[in-house]
Image (cartoon, rainbow, N blue to C red):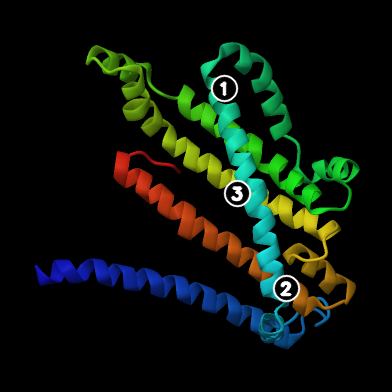
Amino acid sequence: MRSSRLRPSREVSLKLLRIVGFYVAIVAVWSLLGRAEVWSPFLFPSPEKVFESLRTNFANGLILDGLQASLRRLAAGYAISFVLGMSLGLLTAAWRFADETIGGVVLGLQSLPSITWLPLAVLWFGLSESAIIFVVLMGSTFSIAISARSGMRGLPPLLARAAGTLGATRWQLYRYVVIPAMVPSMVQGMKQGWSFAWRSLMAGELLFVSVGLGHLLDVGRNLNNINMVFAIMLVIIAVGVAVDRLIFGRAEAWVHERWGFSAG
């Protein structure tokens, strides 16, 4: 019995060791390439230089200020896109006419790269915070809408009929059958919408913003500071991975544990 308790702990330790070993190997290879100067240090910096740039820009507050500004814009745009996306998704799933009309528009707009909304945003809102939030909103709304529609349309008719046979009211049908069946697709749509929103935000900040991670990338480019460019890229990647694992990863695990559905 004691060995059975230790086994999961050992498996977790081995998994952690493999992950840490993988990233240590990447940094080691990166360091060797940097020291060998296979490419010019002005084009491919060593990890030591990049980590030094990270330390410096965290210490002087540049990265923290930029991160705070970027997350504030992201939260505003993503919150609006979630409400709009869910509303569009439920509307097109529940109403055939809306699906045949608005649904086609949603599919078409989803195919547009997020950055293509930027010229329109500038014309409508000028070089402002509203323009960036608009780009974030348009980048994520339609993926959330499509996932919400798919979740509701994907409900097996047999489940609805079985609930009706058992005497479920319309409210009970939605609460205990429709919503649980939709949640996995909703979580997946939110996850996809977040990734689109994050990329849209960085693209917008690269072009015109006074504070933000995307703007710091542009500052590094203008200063010919490759160390700073790599450092900010690492921060952007770290934020993306952290949100995916800590928020959406836990949400997917909760969905699987609560209802036995997979959100992946």
Question: Where residue 43 appears, x then y in whole percent?
Answer: 82, 76
Question: Where residue 215 appears, x then y in whole percent?
Answer: 80, 65
Q: Please indicate whether residue 63 sits to the left or right of residue 243 in the image.
A: right
Q: Amino acid at mark 2?
A: Phe
* The quarter of the displayed image where residue 226 is located: bottom right
Find residue 91 and name its label: 1
Question: Where residue 194 appears, x then y in whole percent?
Answer: 60, 49
| Residue at screen point 32% across, 20% down | 159
Q: Nearer the viewer, mark 1 or mark 3?
A: 1
Q: Please indicate whether residue 67 sits to the left or right of residue 188 in the image.
A: right
Considering only order in the chain, which callout, 3 or 1, is on the residue closer to the N terminus? 1
Q: Please indicate whether residue 134 sits to the left or right of residue 99 in the image.
A: right
Q: Which residue is mark 3?
A: 194
Q: Amino acid at mark 3?
A: Trp
Residue count near mark 2 (Cα–Cα under 10 Å), binned few <14, some 14–19, many ≥20:
many
Q: CA distance from mark 2 to mark 3?
A: 23 Å
Q: CA distance from mark 1 to mark 2?
A: 43 Å
| Residue at screen point 78% across, 53% down | 129
Q: Nearer the viewer, mark 1 or mark 2?
A: 1
Q: Is residue 44 visible?
A: no
Q: Which residue is mark 2?
A: 230
Secondary structure of residue under mark 2 = helix
* The quarter of the displayed image where residue 217 is located: bottom right
Q: Is residue 64 above or below residue 167?
A: below
* The quarter of the displayed image where residue 137 is located: top right
* Numbered disc total: 3
Q: Amino acid at mark 1?
A: Leu
Q: Is residue 177 above or below residue 26?
A: above
> Viewer-proximal residue, 120 or 188?
120
Considering only order in the chain, which callout, 3 or 2, is on the residue closer to the N terminus? 3
Secondary structure of residue under mark 1 = helix
Q: Please indicate whether residue 135 sits to the left or right of residue 196 in the image.
A: right
